[in-house]
């Protein structure tokens, strides 16, 4: 068996960012089974060769693990996993931080099936390779910040249970992508979500479900973000009036646009323009 392990002690400044990597490594020819182990923080494991099983306290049964499988181990939850029979090869990462709860709320980390196929297998492995490399460096604030940032890339690459495995195309994903294209096409004018559903020959509920799977938002909320993103660009790089900007991004009522912009961005459109142009 060959193993590489790097244990880290992130400074308080990195903990304050919300995620901190406390260990990372790779094992080739792992033959040990971890039995009823519970960790103080989160762990993630990618199996690259071999096969075995995983059992998590509170999750019924044993879960098959094969090459390409990824699983998260929540803090404080006893777990048993390992190759059966023979050996397997794995990457592992340990981390902690208050942001883990927010990721769970969004459907990431251990908020779904115990074992998943990563949404982006190549990205998952690349992120783990980067974490191993960062762990080998002398500890510094910059290396810890880079590790925390790479961990977020890893979480996104593994994806949510709804997104993994992610085939090249399925009818449901196609509906979602087509819906996003229609919303982007029509964002500058009046948009009826029911009309979009009719154009795509699906129910409004199906449309909402597929858009949420791709964006994490309702169709209406996604449309609002599209409009506000375009408004930011017009405010920052043109001299068009607030009313003209409102109409250009799909709001017939400038006062409503100003209220919506202020509620979502935190400042009125005029203030946003001043902030973006300061010093230019």
Image (cartoon, helix red, strand yellow):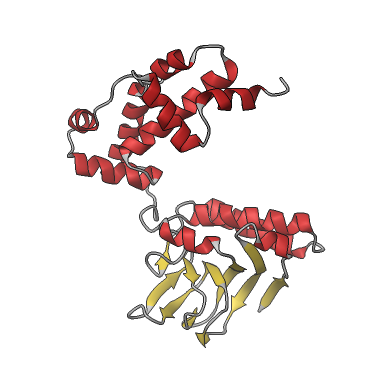
Foreground pick, 183 / 188: 188
Quadrant for residue 196, please give it.
top left
Q: Quadrant of residue 107?
A: bottom left
Which is more toward the observer, 96 or 164? 96
Give the residue furthest to the bottom. 35
Q: Position of residue 33 (x, y in %)?
A: 53, 85
Q: How many marks?
A: 0
Note whether residue 21 is visible. yes
Q: Residue 89: image x %, image y %? A: 57, 71
Could you say where residue 165 lies in the image, as x and y percent from the top left? 39, 55
Residue pictured at 36% horizontal, 32% vertical:
223
Q: Residue furthest right?
A: 138
Image height check: is 100 above or below 82?
A: above
Vertical order, 232 against 167 (above or below)? above
Q: Nearer the viewer, residue 257 or 152?
A: 257
Is residue 267 depicted above or below 138 in this figure? Answer: above
On the image, which quarter does residue 64 sit in? Answer: bottom left
Residue in the picture at 48% in, 58% down: 103
On-image quarter of the C terminus: top right
């Amino acid at each position: 068996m060959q193993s590489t392990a790097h244990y880290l002690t992130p400074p308080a400044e990195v903990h304050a960012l919300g995620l901190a990597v406390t260990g990372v490594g790779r094992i080739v020819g792992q033959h040990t089974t971890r039995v009823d182990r519970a960790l103080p923080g989160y762990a993630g494991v990618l199996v690259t060769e071999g096969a075995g099983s995983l059992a998590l306290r509170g999750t019924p049964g044993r879960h098959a693990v094969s090459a390409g499988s990824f699983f998260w181990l929540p803090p404080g939850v006893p777990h048993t996993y390992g190759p059966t029979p023979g050996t397997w090869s794995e990457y592992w990462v340990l981390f902690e931080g208050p942001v883990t709860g927010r990721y769970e709320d969004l459907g990431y980390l251990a908020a779904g099936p115990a074992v998943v196929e990563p949404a982006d297998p190549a990205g998952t492995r690349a992120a783990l390779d980067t974490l191993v490399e960062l762990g080998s460096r002398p500890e510094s604030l910059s290396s810890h910040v880079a590790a925390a940032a790479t961990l977020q890339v890893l979480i996104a690459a593994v994806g949510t249970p709804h997104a993994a495995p992610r085939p090249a195309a399925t009818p449901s994903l196609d509906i979602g992508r087509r819906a996003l294209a229609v919303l982007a096409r029509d964002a500058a004018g009046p948009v009826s979500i029911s009309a979009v559903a009719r154009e795509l020959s699906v129910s409004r509920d199906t449309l909402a479900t597929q858009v949420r799977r791709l964006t994490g938002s309702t169709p209406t909320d996604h449309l609002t973000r599209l409009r506000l993103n375009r408004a930011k660009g017009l405010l920052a790089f043109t001299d068009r009036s607030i009313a003209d900007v409102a109409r250009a991004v799909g709001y017939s009522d400038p006062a409503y646009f100003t209220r919506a912009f202020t509620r979502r961005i935190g400042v009125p459109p005029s203030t946003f323009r001043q902030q973006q142009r300061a010093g230019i």
